[in-house]
Amino acid sequence: MSASSPPGKSALFRHQPFLFYFVARIFSEFSFLIGAVAVGWQIYALTDSAFALGMVGLVQFIPTALLVFIAGHIADRYDRRRVVQICQIVDAATAIFLAWGSFAGWLSAPMIFTAVAVFGVTNAFESPAVAALLPGVAPEGMLQRASAISTGAFQVAMIGGPALGGIAYAFAPGAPYTMMTVFSLLAALLNGAIRLERLVNAKEEQPTLGALFAGIGFVRKHPAILGTISLDLFAVLLGGATALLPIYARDILHTGPWGLGVLRGAPAIGALITSIVLAHYTIERRVGIRMFQAVIVFGVATVVFALSSSIWLSLVALAIMGAADTVSMVIRISLVQLATPDDMRGRVGAVNFLFVNASYQLGEFESGLTAALLGAMPAAALGGVGTVIVALLWMKLFPTLRDVERLE
């Protein structure tokens, strides 16, 4: 790594469109992560079932898989700000329903799963639009720095959101959902206030099947991008130990909702520290190898977490997992953003979302199912071992990715 020149970061925050985008993303991520803690704890409290925890991920994944390519096309054809804003308003309305049912005492597991499915739909449309909007709010020539700072916003939410959700749930099950409502509405207001200085998605394209799935063709033509996305897909799919955190918090580490919130925030602490380091010291050589090394470290740390019965060791392992995942994420974002033309960013973002971000939900289902069959500790440990094996295999299958020297 070598030191990068720091001047220019303050200019981003003086640029109003990026500032609104940045703060809106913090509010939106806080809302999502507060809800994730509340839903996980409440489902486990109502059902006492590891399989039900895994079903939360599957219920989110199904609408994503069905709608994400349509969502990517919409992000390339319509105003991305309005797409994001509508999704956040729907999230707020759904959170009001969950808060009402929790305070009144009539909320059931099927009702929570229905709400989770709605969140899956909005997330399918919001994620490609948010990713594609970033180049439009960043000043010319500052996309890479804007991407790094935007990733930092996500990590801040990852630290504070789960802890805040756990503390709020300890007061009342409806409190986290009330906070979700407020944060989602604030994010919607800020996204609506963004004024773009240049047109981002001007290309009008008819919604043919070819147009809808053009992102897949683009990814297939770029082996390094295909290898990166598919590697993260399997790493996240197998390494979804965070889905089992309610079990670890209550039954293995013997803590409460506050402890679950702290555990959920631990990966983000490692990720935020790594983001700060990468903002000052860029990875300039052997980028492909560095990515594979990060995934291997992620898998090993997952095994350590799986076998730990100490909350302190568990927190350290989770922080290392977050740090390693951030290295992989920075390389992936840089590769995709630099290689994709603007009128394709929504659809390529949709492919990335389906193969990587949505795999978090499918990984939760896999982890819950495996834990129901084998127990939580063996399930998490096997996932970590599988992640290491996939990384070693991908080094052979995708030599183009392994041999990437620089991010250009």
Image (tube, rainbow, N blue to C red):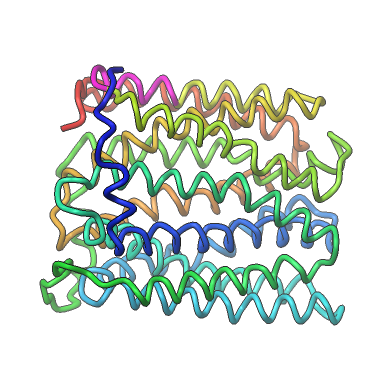
- Which quarter of the figure is the C terminus placed in? top left
The residue positioned 76% from the left and 81% from the top of the image is 100
Above or below: residue 279 compared with residue 12: above
Residue shown at the point (39%, 32%) measured from the top left? 328
Image position of 22 (left or right of 268): left
Task: Name the residue located 27 percent from the left edge and 60 percent from the top edge.
Answer: 132
Quarter-wise, where is residue 279 in the image?
Answer: top left
Residue 275 versus residue 73: which sits nearer the camera?
Answer: 275
Quarter holding the N terminus? top left
Q: Main secondary structure of the magenta part?
A: helix
Magenta-colored stretch includes residue 289: yes
Q: Which x, y percent locates residue 114? A: 64, 75
Res 348 → quadrant: bottom left
Q: Which residues are magenta?
A: 284-294
Q: Is residue 298 above or below residue 86?
A: above
Across and down, in percent, residue 318 comes to: 63, 31
What is the quadrant of residue 225 in the picture?
top left
Side of 229 relative to 48 (left or right): left
Residue occupying image coordinates x 28% and y 62%: 133
Q: Nearer the viewer, residue 148 or 298?
A: 148
Number of numbered tags placed on the structure image: 0
Residue 242 included in the magenta stretch of the image:
no
